[in-house]
Image (cartoon, rainbow, N blue to C red):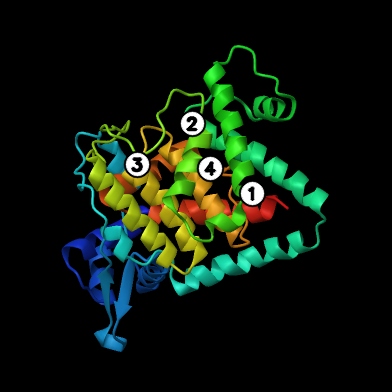
Amino acid sequence: MQQLNERQKNIVGLLSKNNPLSNSQIVEAVGVSRFTVLRDLELLQELGIIKKEGKGRNTRYYLLNNNFFDIDDYFNKGPDERDVKPFNLDFLKKEIFTEKEYSYLNDINKKYRDRVSKMNKTQFRKEMERLTIELSWKSSQIEGNTYTLIDTEMLIKERIEAVGKKKEEAIMILNHKDAIDYILENKDKFKKVNLFEIEKIHQLLTKGLGINYGIRNNPVRIIGTRYSPPSNRSQIVESINLIIDKINKTKDPFSKALLSILMISYLQPFEDGNKRTSRILGNAILLANDICPLSYRSVNESDYKKGMILFYEQNYVKYFKELFVEQFKFAVDNYF
């Protein structure tokens, strides 16, 4: 993910206090050459942090709201020092991927479709088995599971549990395999999302782990943040139905998938296993639309958790959206 240098952060800081500014005003304030400032401004526009309006001497630069966070500065503050937005569904009104971003993702996916079209069933099954093992491993690791990738392969292929590991860790991984098998066998069911299928995925992922099925009746708390999802069951039911409705009305399947990942995690409709459910649901939507699923193999767990916390606390999507795009590109480049 793109990190800004100190000069670029200074430009963003200037615009946050003096919105808008001309390039000459920015050059004078920053104290570097006009060429350097224009290059920085072009990068900030590409990243969606600022926008430019006007031409010539009338050109002005504006900071786009909610499009920049100094991530390091934000997480240097402890959970109790950060301001947290209360639960809301305002994000459902926003566009997730622009037409340009969608076109970029669609072009990448053409490589996946082309390769899959040339595979026989055995070849596809073997590649899907590899992705299943690596997704089961990484998705479980994000939740604190200590199995290695080799441990996971032995467990899924040979049913051999790793020595010195908890039984629950093996169950979590095998549950992932069952859930992935389910969405593969029932791809068409996820062309339109419904609560029954979301609960089915959750049930498969949490069986044997002492987690109650269905919409929760009790409050939940999330480690590392003061954000609190709704605790009233009727509000949870109403919210998840609004989320499902938005997913189904969204035409772009990449936006559908990302919306599912973010909003199921944000609402936390279940007692536990929400993020696991959201990742598998997101992949179910991608597969239903002939799009390469994500394994998250190369994701840094800390980056994933930071992206979630930024969305929980500030409804800031850019950080996690970049992570999603990176993982999608990685999947297309490394599987099938």
Q: Residue at x 57, y 15 (%)?
A: 165
Task: Tell me the CA gap for discs 2 and 3.
Answer: 14 Å
Task: Tell me the CA gap for discs 1 and 2.
Answer: 18 Å
Task: Tell me the CA gap for discs 4 and 2.
Answer: 23 Å
Tell me the number on the disc at residue 299: 4
Circles 4, 3 touching at the beta carbon (< 8 Å) = no
Residue 74 drawn at (x, y percent) = 28, 43
Task: Tell me the CA gap for discs 4 and 3.
Answer: 25 Å
* Disc with the residue nearer the chain's start (2 vs 3): 2
Tell me the number on the disc at residue 184: 1
Mark 1, Cα crowd under 10 Å, few <14 / some 14-19 / many 20+, is: some
* Disc with the residue nearer the chain's start (1 vs 4): 1
Tell me the residue that label 3 is attached to: 269
Tell me the number on the disc at residue 206: 2
Q: Residue at x 41, y 67 (%)?
A: 249
* Disc with the residue nearer the chain's start (4 vs 2): 2
Indicate left or right for 334 with 98 as reference.
Answer: right
Identity, as a three-letter code, of the amino acid under mark 4: Val
* Secondary element type, mark 4: loop
Mark 4, Cα crowd under 10 Å, few <14 / some 14-19 / many 20+, is: some
Task: Tell me the CA gap for discs 1 and 4.
Answer: 23 Å
Q: Indicate the quadrant where residue 133 lies.
A: top right
Residue at the extreme top: 164
Circles 4, 2 touching at the beta carbon (< 8 Å) = no
| Image: 34 above or below 244 | below
Q: Indicate the quadrant where residue 222 lies.
A: top left
Q: Residue at x 38, y 42 (%)?
A: 306
* Disc with the residue nearer the chain's start (1 vs 3): 1
* Secondary element type, mark 2: helix
Identity, as a three-letter code, of the amino acid under mark 1: Leu
